Image (spheres, helix red, strand yellow):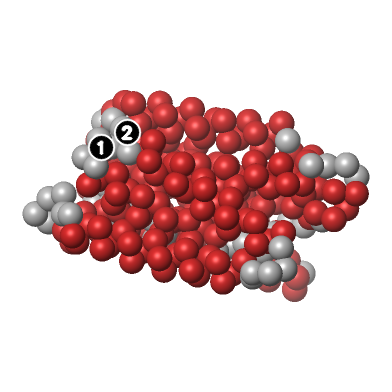
Amino acid sequence: MSDFFEMIALSLQDDFVQNALIVGALISLSSSLLGIILVLKNFSFIGDGLSRVTFAATAIASILRLSSNNNMFVVLPVTMLCAILLLRPGQSRRIRGDAVIALISVSGMALGYLVLTKFPTSNNLSKDVCTTLFGSASILMLSQTQVWLSVALSIAVVAIFVVFYNKIFAVTFDESFAHTAGTKVAAYNLLIAVVIATIIVLAMNLVGSLLISALIIFPAMSAMRLFKSFRSVTICAAVFSVVCSLLGILVASGAGTPVGSTIVAIDLIGYFVFCLISAIRRRA
């Protein structure tokens, strides 16, 4: 056990780990804010659909020989476009949102793997796929450019949520009433779609494309076990997400486990703890 804590203390002196903690905290904070909106709008699985899209877009960026610093110029616009398409069925009766999510999810995964198989960027295809899907240690290998870009985008997402808090609250709970009250529902849904896409792309560095939904859903669902008001759930989810991500990065650094999987495992433990506290409160 002492060796484990020594490894953590040693890793904290590394600039890469320090950068990972900063970026991980900001991405987790942004994801928790987004998760509350998606859960309340019954779009919890939109993260799954978009994460498969980012997998395909990342594969395309890799065959274009774009560096890790430049692939966001391909991945982010593609993900934003698909996010807008996914949210539009929520405003229309013609196509169910879950059907479109399933369609885009399967197509993105198949296209991404097909591209990587046909145009491999290295001799180790399985490692490339595993790193993209599960994150591996990519959060610990961010370049300075990626760190600053992630920080800037995360701060922008948080700022948007704070500035448009009341409008987002109205659109999330009752679109019909918000429209009647004069709120430009379509514009705010578009804004939410852009924010969703940004978070999905950022979260790939932290937990990989397959585990993004956990980063989005667990904080919101955990907070809802204890709190009922929108503001209380928002604050609790933000704290829960940041703490779990920081613990996950530190534990992964000390134990040598995959960062993304470790964060999700701690999220799961935290969720069960909140469920236990909720049960005790009900009995009391």
Q: Position of residue 67 (x, y in %)?
A: 25, 35
Q: Is residue 128 above or below residue 114?
A: above
> Is residue 157 or residue 72 the one in the foreground?
72
What residue is drawn where x is 31% and y is 26%?
144
Q: Is residue 160 left or right of residue 102?
A: right
Q: Is residue 2 above or below residue 100?
A: above
> Is residue 2 or residue 249 the one in the foreground?
249
Q: Position of residue 155 (x, y in %)?
A: 55, 30
Instruction: State how far apart marks 1 and 2 are (Cα).
Output: 6 Å
> Label for residue 70?
2
> Of helix, strand and loop, which one carries label 1?
loop
> Is residue 168 or residue 7 the one in the foreground?
168
Camera sees residue 239: no
Crowding at dot 1, Cα within 10 Å, few <14 / some 14-19 / many 20+, comes out as: some
Q: Are marks 1 and 2 in contact (CB under 8 Å)?
A: yes
Residue position for label 1: 66
Crowding at dot 2, Cα within 10 Å, few <14 / some 14-19 / many 20+, comes out as: few
Q: Is residue 103 above or below residue 256?
A: below
> Of helix, strand and loop, which one carries label 2?
loop
Camera sees residue 159: yes
Q: Residue 140 falls in which quadrant of the image? A: top left
Q: Position of residue 237 (x, y in %)?
A: 62, 50
Q: Which amino acid lies under the numbered mark 1 shown in the image of this protein? A: Leu
